[in-house]
Image (cartoon, helix red, strand yellow):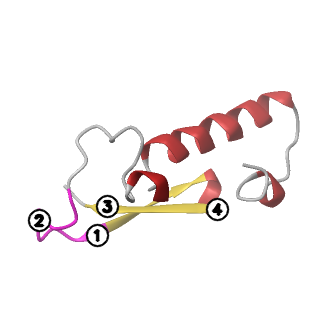
Amino acid sequence: MRTECLDWVLIWNGRHLRKVLTSYLIHYNTGRPHRGLDLEVPKPGQGSVSAWDSDAPIERLDILGGLIHEYRRAA
């Protein structure tokens, strides 16, 4: 968490730290593939669509002010 998140974000106070850590943990547990799980996410996202299920354009979702990008098919 430190090298992937906290080394790149200037933390202002305790409330900001909790917000950053919460956002990162949600991304880590629902959006980030894990090698130990055969590149699956620990908790599949709600309503997530496989990249091969649609011809819809791909949209980018910025997390933590653009520090992390998630990509998914637009609805």
Residue kind at label 1, given as amino acid type = Ile
Q: Is residue 75 above or below residue 19?
A: below
Q: Where does label 1 land, which residue?
A: 58
Q: Residue at x 11, y 65 (%)?
A: 54
Residue kind at label 4, given as amino acid type = Leu
Q: CA distance from mark 2 to mark 4?
A: 27 Å
Q: Left or right: 55 with respect to 57?
A: left
Q: Which residues are magenta?
A: 50-58
Q: Residue at x 70, y 41 (%)?
A: 20
Q: Is residue 22 magenta?
A: no
Q: Residue at x 33, y 41 (%)?
A: 45
Instruction: From the top left corner, tell me how far across and down residue 12 is, in percent.
Output: 88, 41
Residues packed near mark 4 inside 10 Å, few (<14), some (14 to 19) or many (20 plus): few
Residue kind at label 2, given as amino acid type = Ser
Q: Is residue 63 above or below residue 11?
A: below
Q: Earlier in the sequence, mark 3 or mark 1?
A: 1
Q: What secondary structure predominates along the stretch shown in magenta?
A: loop
Q: Is residue 54 magenta?
A: yes
Q: Where does label 4 land, which residue?
A: 67
